[in-house]
Amino acid sequence: MDKYQEAFDGIIERDERVEPRDWMPDEYRKHLIRQVSQHAHSEVIGMQPEGNWLLRAPSLRSKQVLLAKIQDEAGHGLYLYSVAETLGISRAEMLQQLHDGKAKYSSIFNYPALTWADIGAIGWLVDGAAIVNQVSLQRTSYGPYSRGMIRICKEESFHQRQGFEIMLHMANGTPEQREMAQDALNRFWWPSIMMFGPHDSDSPNTGNAMKWKIKRESNDELRQKFIDKTVPQAEFLGLTIPDPDLKWNEEKGSYDYGEIDWEEFWAVVKGNGPCNKERLDHHIKAHKDNAWVREAAEAYAAKTEGELV
Ligand code: 3HC
């Protein structure tokens, strides 16, 4: 084995971090570009369902909090695009892959936010699931990704609290509000646990991801962690999780849960979810409409660069 591969294997073995200037196998680089760019796309597309509720937030405070959360998500997208750029892909290339349907983003964002309680369910469940996944990714082997996750996790917990607060308010509100909260849980529960990806046995990327310590826990391990953490929260809210097979398994020390509808999952991943077209059309239009901002920023950078030299 050549000395470069040996050095790389040593970093992984010693649980140290691979840095942009380190030699790395092409497959490792490609795997990270795929995962990190899709993570970034998810953060940015994820702003759409929430953005649709900014003008309809029920109070000035809830509007301020939602706006702060959405701005955070934009920042998370920027951190992650910057991480991917350290691996040698340009922002333009990543966005082209998204627009051409060659790059994915999280399936969860292809579901509509129909009521204000959905904004609560998104913060509580979607950001809750993202936290479980991202806390684990803080220990990922690629340095810039790990450091980006540490920064993102600090903000993510505010997002989850924001959603849970909305759910608590509505679950303790009028019968109509309670019903709205239950309806949001009914529609967002299963898509939220699908966020963790296919079962480990059906996951083509998990093998390498674990070998290279890009993933530190598998899809099913993280899904189970999220379910075990969230069920007591639903009980506290007095809401019912829409899974008749959900049952505490004393022996396992965690919850058994029903079979996920993988047909629905793959249909949404392949572009046939309720909002896939709307989300992508909106992103493409915004990218086109705001080309002038990018051009102005690039022109300014080129001009000031000239002055600085
Ligand atoms: N939505 C869309 N595609 C999904 C998916 C989902 N929920 N779960 C899996 N997939 C795709 C994978 O991307 C892969 O396709 P690809 O090879 O073309 O990329 C295929 O299904 C098989 O899945 P694998 O499990 O083999 O793929 P991974 O090993 O990459 O695991 C993952 C999938 C767990 C999502 C992993 O990529 C990951 O941890 N990514 C980083 C976290 C992330 O992207 N989270 C998305 C949500 S971000 C968010 O919620 C923001 C918050 O602020 C709200």
Image (tube, rainbow, N blue to C red):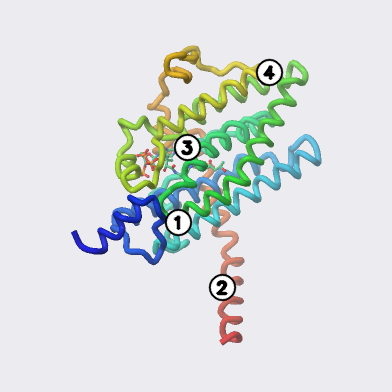
Say which quadrant the C terminus sits in.
bottom right
What is the spatial separation of the Cα atoms under label 3 and label 4, in whole angstroms? 25 Å
Residue 298, numbered label: 2
Q: Which mark is residue 107?
A: 3
Q: Is residue 120 left or right of residue 216?
A: right
| Nearest to the observer: residue 220 or residue 285 | 220
Tell me if the residue at label 4 has its CB under 8 Å from ligand 1.
no
Category of crowding for the residue at label 2, using alpha-carbon neighbours closer than 10 angstroms: few (below 14), some (14–19), many (at least 20)? few
Q: Secondary structure at mark 1?
A: helix
Decide which of tag 1 and tag 4 comes sooner along the chain: 1
Query: In the image shown, does 111 or 128 lie closer to the viewer?
Result: 128
* Label of residue 143 in the image: 1
Q: Along the polypeptide, which appears first: circle 1 or circle 2? A: 1
Nearer-N-terminus badge (3/4): 3
Residue 222 versus residue 231 in the image, above or below: below
Q: Residue 12, image x and y in percent?
A: 34, 52
| SS type, badge 4 | helix
For the residues carrying marks 1 and 3, which lies nearer the camera in this image? Answer: 1
Q: Amino acid at mark 2?
A: Glu
Q: Which residue is the extreme one toward the front? A: 14
Disc 1 or disc 4, which is closer to the eye?
Answer: 1
How would you rate the neighbour count of disc 3 (Cα within 10 Å): few for under 14, some for 14-19, many for 20 or more? Answer: many
- Give the camera-side residue of 137 and 95: 137
Distance from Cα at disc 1 to Cα at disc 4: 45 Å
Query: Amino acid under label 4?
Result: Glu
In percent of width and height, residue 68 lies at 70, 47
